[in-house]
């Protein structure tokens, strides 16, 4: 009876399309015996995925995943999980959340920790791991300090002649100073909240990155302003409008439409 119940539970998860688990990803070129800590990732699978989205968090980038974690709340549940759920979006994305094994200092002017070779190689390892696992195009998304991560990562790929590893990007509530190079030819969706109160991630700065890309990037670009949601009585760089609180649906719909159409 227990085996039968387990079978039906697994079948139900497959039908719904969203299955969540923590997946450890070894640093490229190492194995379990190397002593190098793997990068833990949280995965939501989609029943009919066409792409895999790799998300790099802001803040200090260390979420503290444990192998037995089965769910994520807050920004992640409200903005990212629906991209794998066909009842809310096209359900065309596997969604991967990257967890740095160590804290990445935010810095006062720019998060230079997001330029470190270890951090960028870990992103590369995760991208390559999921590209091989599913055989689907990879999109990268960075929010706040995470936008610095994806721009630094993409510039590294360009230097190494590997830019085709990534098929598109989402530049979300970006940390000031984060920018793609003028050699970038990549579909990019820019997201910003009109009332973002974080002085280190202003819509003005992200709009300037968008305008610069319009002059040199021949691929599709779009700048979407998030207007709904609520403020919170907390640090404006870690809550409220900056984190699309109460407006996750605006963000995930914009992402879904940009890559898959209305």
Image: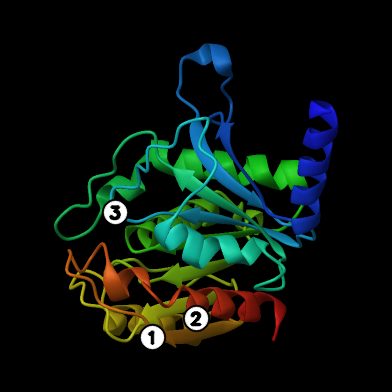
Q: Left or right? Give the position of 212 relative to 85.
A: left
Residue identifier under label 2? 250
Q: Earlier in the sequence, mark 3 or mark 1?
A: 3
Residue 181's image quarter?
bottom left
Decide: is 133 above or below 57. above
Secondary structure beneath dot 2 equals helix
Q: Residues within 10 Å of mark 3 (few under 14, many from 20)?
A: some
Residue depicted at 40% across the width and 59% down the height:
74
Task: Give residue 15's position: percent from left, percent from top.
Answer: 81, 55
Using the image as rendered, state which of residue 216 and residue 223 is in the foreground.
Answer: 223
Q: Residues within 10 Å of mark 2 (few under 14, many from 20)?
A: some
Q: Left or right? Give the position of 220 relative to 15.
A: left
Determine the CA span between mark 1 and mark 2. Answer: 8 Å
Residue depicted at 54% across the width and 52% down the height:
157
Decide: is 4 above or below 169. above
Can residue 18 be seen?
A: yes
Residue identifier under label 3? 59
Residue 87's image quarter?
bottom right
Task: Give residue 247's position: percent from left, percent from top.
Answer: 42, 78
Using the image as rendered, state which of residue 227 and residue 192 is in the foreground.
Answer: 227
Name the disc covering residue 228, or none: 1
Furthest toward the front, the residue is: 1
Q: Earlier in the sequence, mark 2 or mark 3?
A: 3
Q: Could you tell me if the residues under marks 1 and 2 are in contact, i.e. CB atoms within 8 Å?
A: yes
Decide: is 16 above or below 134. below
């Amino acid at each position: 009876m227990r085996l039968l119940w387990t079978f039906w539970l697994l079948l139900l998860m497959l039908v719904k399309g969203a299955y969540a688990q923590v997946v450890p990803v070894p640093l490229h070129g190492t194995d379990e015996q190397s002593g190098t800590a793997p990068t833990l990732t949280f995965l939501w699978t989609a029943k009919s995925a066409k792409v895999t989205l790799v998300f790099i968090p802001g803040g200090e980038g260390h979420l503290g995943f444990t192998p037995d974690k089965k769910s994520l709340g807050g920004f992640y549940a409200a903005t990212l999980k629906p991209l794998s759920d066909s009842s809310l979006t096209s359900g065309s994305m596997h969604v991967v959340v990257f967890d740095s094994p160590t804290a990445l200092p935010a810095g006062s002017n720019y998060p230079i920790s997001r330029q470190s070779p270890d951090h960028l190689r870990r992103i590369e390892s995760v991208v390559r791991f999921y590209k091989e696992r599913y055989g689907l195009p990879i999109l990268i998304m960075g929010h706040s300090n995470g936008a610095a991560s994806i721009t630094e990562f993409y510039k590294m790929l360009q230097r190494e002649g590997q830019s085709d590893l990534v098929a598109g990007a989402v530049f979300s509530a970006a940390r000031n100073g984060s920018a793609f190079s003028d050699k970038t030819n990549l579909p990019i969706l820019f997201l910003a909240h009109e009332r973002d109160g974080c002085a280190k991630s202003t819509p003005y700065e992200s709009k300037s990155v968008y305008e610069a890309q319009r002059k040199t990037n021949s691929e599709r670009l779009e700048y979407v302003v998030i207007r709904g949601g609520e403020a919170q009585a907390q640090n404006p760089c870690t809550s409220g409008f900056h984190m699309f609180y109460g407006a996750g649906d605006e963000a995930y719909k914009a992402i879904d439409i940009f890559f898959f159409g209305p």
